[in-house]
Amino acid sequence: MIKIENKFLNRIVTYFFDASMEELKNLVDGEIVFVTDRNIFNLHQQKFASQKTIVIEAGEAFKQQASVDYIIAELIKIGATRKTTLIGVGGGVVTDITGYAASVYMRGINFAFVPTTILAMVDAAIGGKNGVDVGLYKNLVGTINQPQFLLYDFNFLQTLPNEEWVNGFAEIIKHACIKDEKLFTDLENNSVDIYKKDVQFLSNLIKKNATIKTNVVIEDEFEKGDRKLLNFGHTFGHAIENLHQLPHGYAVSIGMCMAAKISEEINGFYSEDKLRLEKLLKQYHLPTQCSFDKANVFEILKKDKKRYDASIDFILLNKIGEAKIQSIPLTQLKDLMNQIL
Ligand SMILES: NC(=O)c1ccc[n+]([C@@H]2O[C@H](COP(=O)([O-])OP(=O)(O)OC[C@H]3O[C@@H](n4cnc5c(N)ncnc54)[C@H](O)[C@@H]3O)[C@@H](O)[C@H]2O)c1
């Protein structure tokens, strides 16, 4: 087990890589309550045998306040106290909901995550953003609060469906686009299948990506500046994700292509690099476009959390490995959408 301590503003968060869920009992004082979703629970029941477990329904459609209310009702039934540690074992839906429920139950109890998807391992479980969707509006309600620790048990990945591997690689490609050209080239020289076959190779990739995300967050925990770079591909991505019931990674992939086109139009991003990005996304079986209703998408964009007055903070690429924040007036964004779509 590799132990790395990361110093966030209000908490040191320890990441345990190459670990096993059985080691949790040595890491937590007091009672543990697990939160997981039905798919993971059914596939890995033996891992939950020793502790109380709250099982929520799987999928983004259940990342709503009703699931938080259910968890709170179960915690009351269990008799959970301020000494209880809530541990979210799952993908980003479970970790987002668990962090939020733990942050509000009794005004805040300890919590930790065991991420079980690639996406949660490299992204969702890191950084302390927790919350739920409200109807179609993604992550509209929530908190920023760091977990005590993350435990990476790669054993879970044996049951991860192929579609979810692909989803996770969208965020890995995003990290390469905004921060790491060398990672982009490494990805060009490999494939999902190669990473799947070699646990150590995959573990290194996950550690590298967890570190990229962690460092960006540590520099700007409350998203006043550079943390916004992590939203590359997400502004459009979030708008089309719930509207078209797309998997998160697919939506982000399409969003990155749109952002690359806008970068080409107004930021001098090279057309060849835009094509390189599209080729890489296709190599990792990710979509680069989809048809959607521009008017509906625009209505959702207008409610985006990154909108200030009549402008929206958009993440553009200067080149592969380097991104910037640019405020784009909604009127210009509408014109750009009409131009590039
Ligand atoms: N908080 C953040 O900073 C942040 C960052 C990125 C994404 N997110 C959020 O993360 C969510 C997406 O996360 P996700 O893609 O992990 O989705 P998810 O949690 O819905 O998991 C995807 C599917 O995989 C199943 N699954 C999970 N682990 C499995 C395993 N080991 N074996 C078999 N099946 C397994 C789940 O049951 C689910 O059906 C979105 O809601 C997104 O908004 C949050």
Image (cartoon, rainbow, N blue to C red):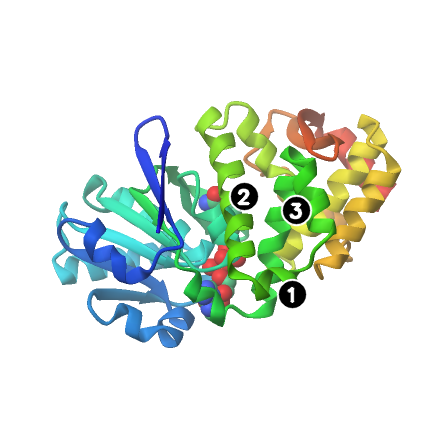
Return the residue nearer the eye: 291 or 254. 254
Q: Is residue 143 visible?
A: yes
Q: Is residue 237 above or below residue 250?
A: above
Label 1: which residue? 193
**Is label 3 or label 1 in front?**
1
Q: How dense is the environment of label 2, judged by Cα within 10 Å: few (below 14), some, or many (20 and up)?
A: many
Q: Is residue 139 visible?
A: no
Please report the residue visible at 66 percent of the width from the left and 46 percent of the height from the top: 173
**Cβ of mark 2 under 8 A from ligand 1:** no
Nearer-N-terminus badge (3/1): 3
Which residue type does callout 3 highlight?
A: Ile
Label 3: which residue? 173
Q: How dense is the environment of label 1, judged by Cα within 10 Å: few (below 14), some, or many (20 and up)?
A: few
Answer whether labels 2 and 1 touch (C-beta < 8 Å).
no
**What SS does tag 3 mark?**
helix
Return the residue nearer the eye: 213 or 92. 213
Which residue type does callout 2 highlight?
A: Asn
Write down the quadrant of residue 258 in the picture.
Answer: top right
Q: CA distance from mark 2 to mark 1?
A: 18 Å
**What SS does tag 1 mark?**
helix
Q: Which labelled disc corresponds to residue 209?
A: 2
Please provide percent x and percent y for residue 52.
20, 65
Q: CA distance from mark 3 to mark 2?
A: 10 Å
Please provide percent x and percent y for residue 297.
69, 47
Q: How dense is the environment of label 3, judged by Cα within 10 Å: few (below 14), some, or many (20 and up)?
A: many
Please report the residue visible at 84 percent of the width from the left and 45 percent of the height from the top: 275
Q: Is residue 220 left or right of residue 232?
A: left
Nearer-N-terminus badge (2/1): 1
Which residue type does callout 1 highlight?
A: Asp
Q: CA distance from mark 3 to mark 1?
A: 16 Å
